[in-house]
Image: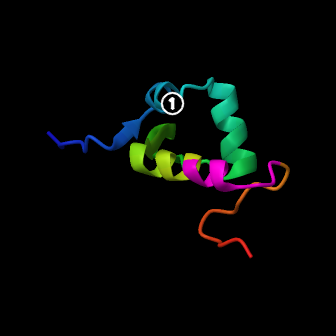
């Protein structure tokens, strides 16, 4: 049996629950705002608590809600 990290979130239900948002909001954020989740084999969504927390912090620090930050790119 593979041991799973406590930080790992597997499946849209776990991701949605941790982010406290609906599945449609999470999908929208993935497509439009760089939300840190991706599909792995079999179409299962995965993410991590750490990645989501960092993403949320970047959203709060962003002073222009119409122009969300690009992950990994520093603001000028």
Q: Crowding at label 1, few (<14), some or many (≥20) Cα neighbours within 10 Å? A: many
- In the image, residue 5 lies at what x, y percent? 25, 45
Is 74 in the magenta? no
**Picture quadrant where residue 14 is located:** top left
Residue in the foreground of this view, choosing between 43 and 31: 31
Q: Quadrant of the C terminus?
A: bottom right
Q: Could you say whether the residue bearing mark 1 is in a helix, strand or loop?
A: helix
- In the image, residue 52 lies at what x, y percent? 50, 45
**Outermost residue toward the left in this view:** 1
Q: Residue at x 71, y 71 (%)?
A: 75
Measured along the vertical axis of the image, is residue 64 above or below residue 11?
Answer: below
Is 58 in the magenta? yes
Q: Residue at x 82, y 56 (%)?
A: 67
Q: Is residue 49 left or right of residue 62?
A: left
Residue in the foreground of this view, choosing between 64 and 70: 64
- In the image, residue 19 lies at what x, y percent? 53, 32
Measured along the vertical axis of the image, is residue 15 above or below residue 54?
Answer: above
Provide the residue designation for mark 1. Answer: 12
**Outermost residue toward the right in this view:** 66
- Which range is magenta? 57-65
Residue in the foreground of this view, choosing between 4 and 22: 22
Q: Quadrant of the N terminus?
A: top left
Q: Residue at x 46, y 30 (%)?
A: 18
Q: Is residue 66 left or right of residue 57?
A: right
- The count of marks equals 1
- In the image, residue 26 lies at what x, y percent? 63, 34
Which coloring applies here? rainbow
**Picture quadrant where residue 49 is located:** top left
């Amino acid at each position: 049996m593979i041991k799973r990290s406590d930080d790992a979130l597997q499946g849209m239900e776990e991701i949605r629950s941790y982010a406290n948002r609906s599945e449609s909001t999470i999908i929208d954020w993935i497509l439009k705002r760089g939300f840190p989740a991706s599909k792995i084999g079999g179409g299962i969504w995965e993410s991590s608590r750490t990645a989501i927390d960092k993403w949320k912090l970047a959203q709060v620090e962003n002073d222009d809600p119409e122009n969300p930050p690009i992950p990994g790119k520093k603001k000028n």
